[in-house]
Image (cartoon, rainbow, N blue to C red):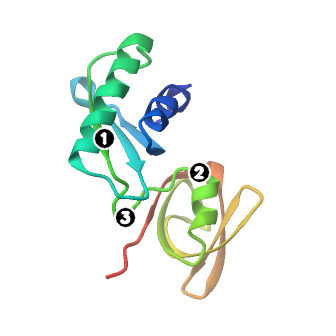
């Protein structure tokens, strides 16, 4: 679920602290909703970095109040199974394995695992079992890198 204007509120606060704002997930669950922010830095992310960003963003969210009700704010690095939020994320990770979940079925299925082959217009092209699959970005509900070990 996307909250209108949330990125525009959060991103400047994160960047002011010297970090890159990767994106966010909002998981509404009644009284136990969760707002998870992902940040990164060339030097990696420490627990202290997450705490700093959490304090800064909390202050912004308290003033702007974009989310109704109670929620928990969590700040994290993207990790090995990094979430992909934008077309540019998919462009950046061409050649990498990804797991994608669609809102509506494409070719009769909603879940795909494959290598990002290309980004064409607003479509993500995956190689799934040597077959080219074109996925409209607007139909993607969730995408993550598949870690290599």
Q: Residue at x 41, y 60 (%)?
A: 82
Q: Nearer the viewer, mark 1 or mark 3?
A: 1
Q: Position of residue 49 (x, y in %)?
A: 29, 43
| Residue indicated by mark 3 | 81
Q: Circle 1: is it few (<14), some (14-19), or many (20+) Cα within 10 Å?
A: many
| Marks 1 & 3, CB-CB < 8 Å contact | no
Q: Is residue 102 left or right of residue 44?
A: right
Q: Circle 2: is it few (<14), some (14-19), or many (20+) Cα within 10 Å?
A: some
| Residue indicated by mark 1 | 75
| Marks 3 & 2, CB-CB < 8 Å contact | no
Q: Is residue 68 left or right of residue 133?
A: left
The mark that comes first in sequence, 3 or 2, is 3
Circle 2 — which element? loop
Instruction: Check the image and report above or below for 62 versus 85.
Output: above
Real-space Cα separation, disc 1 to disc 3, in angstroms: 16 Å
Q: Is residue 79 visible?
A: yes
Instruction: Check the image and report above or below for 116 versus 82.
Output: below
Q: Residue at x 40, y 71 (%)?
A: 146
Q: Nearer the viewer, mark 1 or mark 2?
A: 1
Circle 3 — which element? loop
- Give the residue at the far top of this rendering: 63
What number is the disc on residue 86? Answer: 2
Real-space Cα separation, disc 3 to disc 2, in angstroms: 15 Å
Task: Tell me which corner region of the image, top left, top right, bottom left or bottom right, holds residue 88.
Answer: bottom right
- Give the residue at the far bottom of this rendering: 130
Q: Circle 3: is it few (<14), some (14-19), or many (20+) Cα within 10 Å?
A: some
The mark that comes first in sequence, 1 or 2, is 1
Q: Residue at x 22, y 29 (%)?
A: 32
Q: Position of residue 81 (x, y in %)?
A: 37, 64
Real-space Cα separation, disc 1 to disc 2, in angstroms: 19 Å
Residue sitting nearer the eye, 40 or 131: 40
What number is the disc on residue 14? Answer: none
């Amino acid at each position: 679920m996307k909250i209108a204007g949330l990125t525009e509120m959060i991103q400047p606060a994160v960047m002011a602290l010297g970090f890159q704002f990767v994106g966010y997930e909002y998981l509404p669950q009644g009284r136990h909703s969760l707002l998870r922010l992902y940040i990164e830095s060339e030097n990696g992310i420490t627990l202290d970095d997450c705490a700093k960003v959490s304090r800064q963003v909390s202050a912004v969210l308290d003033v702007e109040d974009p989310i109704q009700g109670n929620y928990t704010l969590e700040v994290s690095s993207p990790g090995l199974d990094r979430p992909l939020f934008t077309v540019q994320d998919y462009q950046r990770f061409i050649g990498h394995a990804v797991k994608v979940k669609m809102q509506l079925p494409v070719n009769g299925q909603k879940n795909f695992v494959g290598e990002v082959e290309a980004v064409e217009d607003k479509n993500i092209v995956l190689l799934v079992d040597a077959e080219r699959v074109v996925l409209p970005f607007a139909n993607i509900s969730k995408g993550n890198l598949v870690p290599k070990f």
